[in-house]
Image (tube, rainbow, N blue to C red):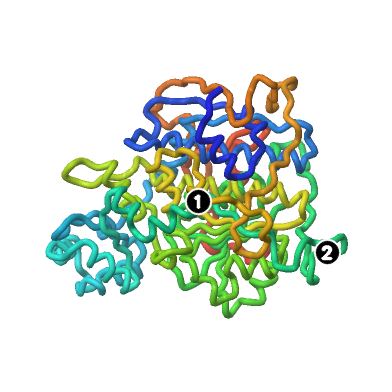
Amino acid sequence: MTHSPIAAVWDELGGDPALLPGVSTVVRAGALEAALPVRESARACVGACALAAAELGARRAGLARVPRVSVDDGAVATAFVSERHLRIDGRAPVGFAPLSRFWRTADGWVRTHANYPHHRARLLDALGAADDAGAEDVAGLLAGRSAREIEESVYDAGGLAVALRTPEEWAAHEQGLALAEHPLIEWGGPGGRGGPAGPGGAAGGRRRARLLAPPAGTGPLLPASGVRVLDLTRVIAGPVATRTLALLGADVLRLDAPRLPEDPDSHADTGFGKRSALLDLVADRRAFDELLAAADVVVTGYRPGALDRFGLSPEALAERDPGLVVAQVSAWGTYGPWGGRRGFDSLVQVATGIAVTEGSPGRPGALPAQALDHGTGYLLAAAVLRALTDRTESGRGRVVRLALARTAMWLTDGIGRPEAPGAVPDASKGEPGAVTGPPARTAPAPSPEEPGTVPGTSEREPGTVADASVGEPYDRPDAWLAERTGPVGRLRHALPPVSFTGGPADWSRPPGRWGTDPARWA
């Protein structure tokens, strides 16, 4: 057995360390190779998510044993670049737009993001460029300006640009300092301000969490069966989290505003197992409130503050329904000078020093995958699953927050223990938004006897995982790819890396066309 990043993440999730010996790994050379420990961090995120799923499945199904978890570097590496492996009727997805790239400046480098039309328009407006400006035009405009000045002027115009920084520069930056004071996984209070729910329902007349029936049928064990997830996310991290919950049986309904454009390839990659509807939060507010009233989980991925004007901040949602699990993912966190800024994985890599570490002396580089997005997505799903496990006992929901930039700092710090220095969870504070401890460590008892279950022998000390086996080097993803036909065409896609004994091997349905499902629960 070895102490591992999976154990550190599991501890931050509030998981029972006695379950860790039931996690086995297959290590493959060549998977997610990088200067930073990307392979190890990806393995930890997926492994913790799979263990949280197995734990919830055992709890809801009334199993005496928690199913064993297997994490294969090949499956993880393939899934972490799922958008690259996707094929729709043989066609590869469209990648980064021409204006989403690194640019030389007068004093260094800057990276811009202009994949969406409105972000492209704001970038060009900030630079004083014509609407039809191309890469050469933009390069000329940026070459004579400082990277930090470009960063601020583009953000002021509502666009996205980030100056290249070293890890040391980011650690000294105000936002880096703010993030360092927070844990990787930030838990908020268990429900609203009304106190614990009593036998007759939630305090203040608000409902308790819906009682979920045990997973039924003879098919795979689906830990999230019957769980209703309202998906208010966009662009990889949030959609990966909700795609994972859909794999595990949740009824995931993604809602988008009709006016916001969506990349159909990105939707196809992250839409497995989900339904997708369009809803205007002003014109269709009654319909939205009806959906919200019946939801078990809400996952949000918009810029912090963007949903507040609709009364949908995590705190407001928790106050409205103490039984609701609320999960929020952001680029930079919800605090500090950058707390309200937009951001994407590629930009976070540049700001936090990852692009310097992964680059060459003369040019910045990038991780072998959008690992901040994917890793944070699996961590977010794991946190939701742990909160649901806790809710089976308490009847109360939780608020959980993650940020790509905090995941980046965990990675650049060498994926040691992810807790913030000096951060002491305080489980006595139950107000919405208060930083409290993770869910309680409650799980079916592990057993050393039964094959396919978590062994819990006295030889294995808490905080260790089963020894890893060494597999063949990772050179081809074929073993972790599948094909199927759906509404968007013939798809080749990456299989899910979340794996436990008796669990699902693939999603129950392929992605549908974006925004074409009715806005109602299944």
Please tell me whether residue 395 is drawn above or below residue 85 in the rendered image: below
Q: Amino acid at mark 1?
A: Thr
Counting from the top left corner in percent of width and height, residue 278 is at: 55, 68
- Residue displayed at 53% across by 37% down: 497
Please tell me whether residue 94 is drawn above or below residue 10 in the rendered image: below
Which residue extends farthest right? Answer: 200
In this picture, residue 457 sits left or right of residue 5:
right
Neighbours of disc 1 within 10 Å: few (<14), some (14-19), many (20+): many
* Number of the label disc, if any, that sits on residue 201: 2
Query: What residue is disc 1 on?
Result: 270
Residue 465: quadrant of the picture: top right
Counting from the top left corner in percent of width and height, residue 498 is at: 57, 38
Please tell me whether residue 511 is drawn above or below residue 339 in the rendered image: above
Counting from the top left corner in percent of width and height, residue 346 is at: 34, 52
Residue 210: quadrant of the picture: bottom right
In this picture, residue 350 sits left or right of residue 139:
right
Q: Quadrant of the N terminus?
A: top right
Q: Amino acid at mark 2?
A: Gly
